[in-house]
Image (cartoon, rainbow, N blue to C red):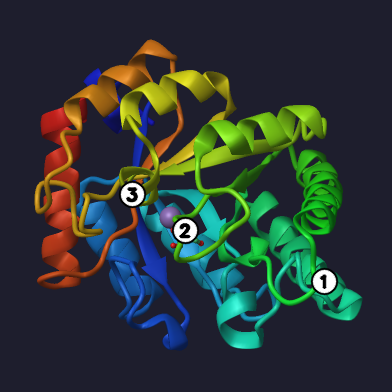
Amino acid sequence: MGKAGKAGGMKSAVTICLVPEAKQGPFVFHEGLEGGCLAAAELGFDGVEIFPESAEAFPSEAIDRLLADCSLSLAAVGTGGGWIKHKLHLCHADPAIRQRARDFIAKLIDVAGERGAPVIVGSMQGTLAGNVSREMALDWLAESLALLGQRACRHGQVILYEPLNRYETNLFNQQAAAAAFCDIRGLDHVRLLCDLFHMNIEEAHVSQALVAVGSRIGHVHWADSNRCAVGLGHTDTRPVIAALRSIGYEGFLSAEVFPLPNGIQAAHKSIESLRECAGF
Ligand code: LER
Ligand code: MN
């Protein structure tokens, strides 16, 4: 964390995708773990956020070696490989698929937890479809997040639940509604992942929305309005940083953006924006 400096307790991270099917996805590095870690370290990021295919395919030995050699933290581990590769999610009408989705995430909680990191439940939350009522889906989601949260807690971790924009889920699109859901359902081991790209679409006021959920925030995806690196769109990130400072946020600001014009330049622009806006 020593690199954070004026950023207070906030830390920088950059995304590395290990799922070939997600080649078009909003991840900075797609060309392998080693290249991604070396570039992240070279650019001065504090950590990396990894999007693996599954727990079984998680390259534990290589990750441990690279994190140690590059002095990087593991910021978080994505679970969306379960959706992209197997179409699993936590609100599926079929109980067997819901169970497989939960098992898929549970195994990733263990590999992430052993390395001091939380997992992200984003696309694996699913979306309401067919005859599934909202009430039913939210019961299933709460039940899974409670069980998975307990598992994360055994590693001293939380689950990062990510409200997504309306084109990706109809469960929760806004932070306040997701926070109220966590409160009402007693989801003590769940924190919110605030993705500035989704928030730019869904929130009336991004920085006010951050302040309103305050201590529920566990992670931030650092992205501009067009999902490019911050600085390449029209989001004003200064009030965002002021809002995070005002609530004493000490987690990661993780660049989850398209590799445009390429991964290295997106990473460079991301760390530069963190230095300019947040004093990294
Ligand atoms: C998906 O849009 C997203 O933001 C990811 O972080 C979800 O896993
Ligand atoms: Mn995100």
Query: Are the residues flagged by discs 1 and 2 in contact, CB closer than 8 Å?
Result: no
Name which residue type carries label 2.
Arg
Q: Nearer the viewer, residue 217 or 164?
A: 164
Q: Which residue is mark 3?
A: 201
Name which residue type carries label 1.
Arg
- CA–CA distance in space, label 3 to label 1: 28 Å
Secondary structure beneath dot 1 equals helix
Q: Nearer the viewer, residue 277 or 130?
A: 130
Q: Is residue 108 above or below residue 55?
A: above
- Give the mark toward the camera: 1 or 2: 2
Query: Are the residues flagged by discs 2 and 3 in contact, CB closer than 8 Å?
Result: yes
The reply to whether residue 58 is visible in this rendering is: yes
- Quarter that holds the C terminus: top left
Q: Which residue: 53% across, 24% down?
A: 213
Q: Which residue is mark 2?
A: 166
- Quarter that holds the N terminus: top left
State the image coordinates of residue 143 (x, y, percent, origin top left): 86, 50
Tell me if the residue at label 2 has its CB under 8 Å from ligand 1.
Answer: no
Query: Residue lying farthest top?
Result: 246
Compare marks 2 and 3 and give the one earlier in the sequence.
2
State the image coordinates of residue 227 (x, y, percent, origin top left): 25, 59
- CA–CA distance in space, label 2 to label 3: 8 Å
| Mark 2: few/some/many CA within 10 Å (<14, 14-19, 20+) | some
Name which residue type carries label 3.
Ile
Secondary structure beneath dot 2 equals loop
